[in-house]
Image (cartoon, rainbow, N blue to C red):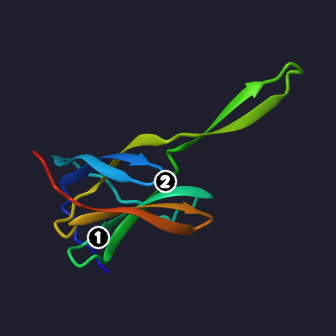
Amino acid sequence: MQVEFQEDKVLVLFLDVAISDAQIRGAKIIDGYFRPLSEDLRQKEALRVQYLNDEGAVLFEKILDNPLIQYKEYSDENGELNRIRIEGEKSSVLLRSQHSEAVKMIRIEYGTNNQFETIATLPLLLTS
């Protein structure tokens, strides 16, 4: 599906994500230009945000590292570098994309090894 973007407008989303829920904290359109990602990114553990039209069809998507998972590195008593995984319960994400009038909702999904599960589908309510 071909999406027509407004070249001089950027959609800014501020999301609150948790293990089994997500909310849009803020959504607004600002002046500017942002080039949509053209490469297909796939992380082992990911957050996928799909931008949908009013019929629920996917117009485009962004795939990010899962913000609930962080890795910390430290040196042990032998001076060896170790890495531990820390899983959080909630986080915030700021997304920017070129604006399109066709975007009416977003779908937020968590994925592991390219298998995604929807946690929320939310209407896009813009503020000024």
Q: Which mark is residue 64?
A: 2
Density class for disc 2 (Cα within 10 Å; few <14, some 14-19, many ≥20) is some
Question: Looking at the image, which is closer to me, 66 or 23?
Answer: 23
Quarter placement of the C terminus:
top left
Instruction: Please provide percent x and percent y for residue 109.
Output: 44, 62
Give the mark nearer the N terminus: 1 vs 2. Answer: 1
User: Is 119 drawn above or below residue 28 in the view shown?
Assistant: below
**Could you say which quadrant of the image residue 61 lies in?**
bottom left
**Could you say which quadrant of the image residue 74 lies in?**
top right
Q: Residue at x 24, y 73 (%)?
A: 53
Q: Residue furthest right?
A: 78
In this picture, residue 86 sits left or right of residue 83: left
Residue highlighted by disc 1:
52
From this viewpoint, is residue 38 visible?
A: no
In this picture, residue 44 sits left or right of residue 125: right
Q: Residue at x 51, y 67 (%)?
A: 116
Q: Secondary structure at mark 2?
A: strand
Instruction: Please provide percent x and percent y for residue 23.
Output: 31, 50
Q: Residue at x 39, y 53 (%)?
A: 21
Q: Residue furthest front?
A: 20
Q: Residue at x 12, y 47 (%)?
A: 127
User: Is 13 drawn above or below residue 118 in the view shown?
Assistant: above
From this viewpoint, is residue 61 visible?
A: yes
Quarter placement of the N terminus:
bottom left
Instruction: Please provide percent x and percent y for residue 99.
Output: 22, 59
Hey, what amino acid is under mark 2? Leu
Hey, what amino acid is under mark 1? Leu
User: Is 100 drawn above or below residue 97 in the view shown?
Assistant: below
Question: Looking at the image, which is closer to me, 86 or 21?
Answer: 21
